Image (spheres, rainbow, N blue to C red):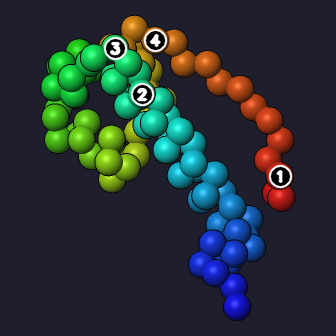
Amino acid sequence: MKTVIDKVMSTKEGRALIHKEQTIMNFLEMVCRVMEEDGVKQEDLVKECGMSGRQFTKILNGKDSMTISEMSRIMFALNRNIWFASNRIKGV
């Protein structure tokens, strides 16, 4: 019997969805780690980013998509650069 993950991973669209979600999760984990390391409070970061608290919370909770521009604003507010790297996706 196939698991839900097996079923999702059996299609190209499913693998693309998983890839997108992993990318978002990796970014959000990085933001949370940097906030913790630097002692940055969410309310201070929200102010620096110029976002509403509600919008920022939805992004952090994975309930709302974010643009590259928003990612950049968040990392700039944390005084960090974003570096992109690529590698071949297995199974696509």
Q: Position of residue 58 (x, y in %)?
A: 27, 46
Q: Nearer the viewer, residue 11 or 6?
A: 6
Q: Earlier in the sequence, mark 3 or mark 1?
A: 3
In the image, residue 19 sits, relative to residue 31, either above or below, namely below
Q: CA distance from mark 4 to mark 1?
A: 30 Å
Circle 3: residue type: Asp
Q: CA distance from mark 3 to mark 1?
A: 35 Å
Q: CA distance from mark 2 to mark 4?
A: 12 Å
Residue at which label 1 appears: 90
Q: Name the disc covering residue 80, or none.
A: 4
Circle 1: residue type: Lys
Q: How many neighbours does mark 1 have within 10 angstroms: few (below 14), some (14-19), or many (20 or more)?
A: few
- Asked if one can make out residue 39 in the rendered structure from this viewpoint, the answer is yes
In the image, residue 55 sits, relative to residue 78, either above or below, namely below
Q: Quadrant of residue 53?
A: top left
Residue at which label 2 appears: 33
- Side of 3 relative to 31 (left or right): right
Q: CA distance from mark 2 to mark 3?
A: 9 Å
Q: Earlier in the sequence, mark 3 or mark 4?
A: 3
Q: Earlier in the sequence, mark 4 or mark 1?
A: 4
Q: CA distance from mark 3 to mark 4?
A: 11 Å
Residue at which label 3 appears: 38
Residue depicted at 49% across the width and 44% down the height = 25
**Of circles 3 and 4, which is in front?**
3
Residue depicted at 53% across the width and 52% down the height = 21
Q: Position of residue 20 (x, y in %)?
A: 58, 50
